[in-house]
Amino acid sequence: MAAGMAVIALLAAAPAPASAAGGTTATPAAEAGPADLGVPLQDVLLLGGTVAPGPGGTPVLWEASSGAPAHLNAVDPATGAAVARLDLPGAAGAWAVDATPDGSVYAGTYGDGRLYRWTREGGVADLGRPLPSENFVWSVAAGEGATVYGGTSPGGRLFGYDPATGFRDYGKLSASHAYVRSVSYAGGKIYAGTENPAAVFEVDAATGVAEKLPTPPGLDVTDKWAYDVNVAGGFLFVRYGSAFPGPLHVWDIAARAWTDTLESAHGLDVSPPDDQGRIYFVKGGELVGYDPRTRTVTPTGMPFTGRVANTRGIGWAELGLPDYPGKSLVGLLWRGLMFRYNPQTGARSFVQTGIQGEPIDITAIADGPDGRVYVGGFLNGGFAALDPVTGEREEFHTFSQSEAMTAHGGKLYVGAYPEARVYAYDPSLPWNSTEYSPSPEPGPAPNPARLLDFATDKQIRPRALTPAGRYVAVGTMPDLGQVGGVLALWDPREGRMAYSQRHVVEDQSIVSLAYRDGVVYGGTSIYGGQSATPPTQPEAKLFAWSVREKRLLWELVPAPGKPAVPALAFDDRGRLWGIAGGEVFAVNVATRKVVSRVTLSDSASSSGALVFNARDRRLYGAHAGAQVFALDPRTGKRSVLKEGPVHHLAVHRSGAVYFAEGPKLFRYQPQSR
């Protein structure tokens, strides 16, 4: 996932409603108010972890699972059973987990940027926010005794915590960096890595004096993060790149020199050294041993498959099992699967642990090509299909974070984070995501099939999808440090990209799309796909783009001062409606003028959703993450259907309106008019 996971706060937008014909058309009974359909997406997502003594004093795998709230879990490495599940109140998840020599386990969280400490005597204690300006703790590293160090965003700061003296602010390490993504410690020095262009700092823990280490010879760090830094056995291991495999560079701390490079390292950690000084990590889809003194790699034959094969905590434990004498290497993967390897016997195994799945916030909803309702989720991802009549979930699969969904030509198109990937799912064929959840049946083709991505254009979120005649139109948001999205056309008939252009509207992301009579209409956002990138433009725009001529026809500012137009929809009279902050507007696309405005509030939020329901000829929208409303486009009369933090909604062909409030899905069936 994420510089794959660089920002957790999404700029929400609604996907375009599906328009494919066929499939289920039965209509649920009219409801007096929105019906709660429950939580359709639930799965395990582990981010930060370590191996350290647990509640019983013996080594366990400590892992933070994302949820509301997040939990700190302890897993028995011999059985995979959960031996503790501890609330982290107010936290949504934690990339940062480590254990200090005194037996404390620390977790640094995102959302509110808090630090928690577990001890056998006192359980979990909320230590508060290390730094008031920071809302994300990316990494923590054990120091001496009970001391821990951590790195943050959006200020790119380093902190320390000692139970005896409290928090210490080491300050901003670099004026040009917003993230301290990775932290490690050894010998009185703190090592900290940043986002792109990657920099690694060595900080004296006592004095706070920071020195930037030289970049490895020949390495271009322009687009690379110092994503992982780990100290083991007198060497500093730095993986440059992103959440996905990249080069692992080895720094000899005593010699103060880069000594080796290991390609295709998965991260996120390397193990502590074994008795021979070897560390272990995943390289090129295989667990390997590595001796930094002799620079030799030893294969283990243990394969790691799928898109995400990086470890979430890796260390040593005595298992007491026949094939695992002495100490064995143990670790966890992101979906709760535990791995074990014994260097003496070569025994290896994967075990599904007892860590509970957590509800997943819904980030995309669509009327599918088969008439079912499809939803995708945030961070943990997940993919579910629901019966539109009963509201019951009929399918669930592990999948990527979804940014948008739309139906076209019998397939469901899904935009996924990161790398702005686009997939096509055929519901008439078996599910087989080779990246996330392969089919147990041998041989089926990938379904959903990955069609394209916009990584080379430095894009991260495919926020808008809509059918555009024979094509599927795509609008994207760029990665950290970038501005300017891409407008693209995918041709399903020929299986190729028919067109792709960045900066259709200068320095603006494309976050909503609509189509009519050969023209794609787009709404923009002044923001990129990561909130730390400052915008260069003052306000969002609406644009028209000719599919035949492949050129921009016009652009205008529909809502002065608003930062985004996150949703667009045509009504039955051909007027194009949009939402921008607390304003709903209608545009006559022939005259290129705003012809109607409805003010909901003075909000300048970049969040919002809007769809047109052909059954009752009303607009339905989500306003600034505060409420769901219905609006008569002829009279301007508005009614509030539900108060609450709603960002995503879609209309089904039956006329039912589906919307999400966090992980919960609701259905509203309008009364006959």
Image (cartoon, rainbow, N blue to C red):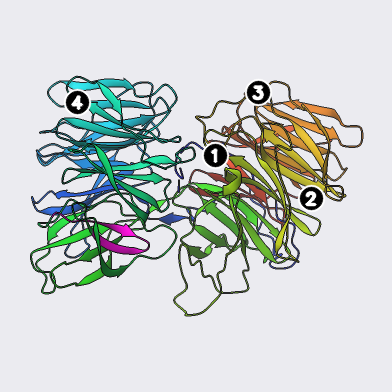
Residue 194 located left or right of residue 386: left
- The three-letter amino acid code for the residue at tag 4 is Ala
The residue beneath circle 2 is 614
- Indicate the secondary structure of the residue bearing disc 3: loop
Tell me the distance, in whole angstroms, between the alpha carbons under discs 3 and 4.
49 Å
Look at the numbered discs 4 and 1 and tell me whether their residues touch, using CB distance below 8 Å: no
Give whichever of discs 1 and 3 has the lower sequence position: 1
Look at the numbered discs 2 and 3 and tell me whether their residues touch, using CB distance below 8 Å: no
**Which residue is more in the foreground, 556 or 76?**
556
Per the image, is 181 magenta? no
Structural crowding at the residue carrying mark 2, measured as other residues with C-alpha within 10 Å and reported as few (<14), some (14–19) or many (≥20): some
Give whichever of discs 4 and 1 has the lower sequence position: 4
Structural crowding at the residue carrying mark 4, measured as other residues with C-alpha within 10 Å and reported as few (<14), some (14–19) or many (≥20): many
Give whichever of discs 4 and 2 has the lower sequence position: 4
The residue beneath circle 4 is 205
Indicate whether 155 appears above or below 275: above
Give whichever of discs 3 and 4 has the lower sequence position: 4
Give whichever of discs 2 and 3 has the lower sequence position: 3
Of marks 3 and 4, the one in the foreground: 4
- Indicate the secondary structure of the residue bearing disc 2: loop
Give the main secondary structure, helix, strand or loop, of the magenta stretch.
strand
User: Residue 563 is drawn in which quadrant?
Assistant: top right
- The three-letter amino acid code for the residue at tag 3 is Ser
| Residue 537 image point, x, y percent | 66, 24
Magenta part of the chain: 277-289
- The three-letter amino acid code for the residue at tag 2 is Ala
The residue beneath circle 1 is 479
Give whichever of discs 1 and 2 has the lower sequence position: 1
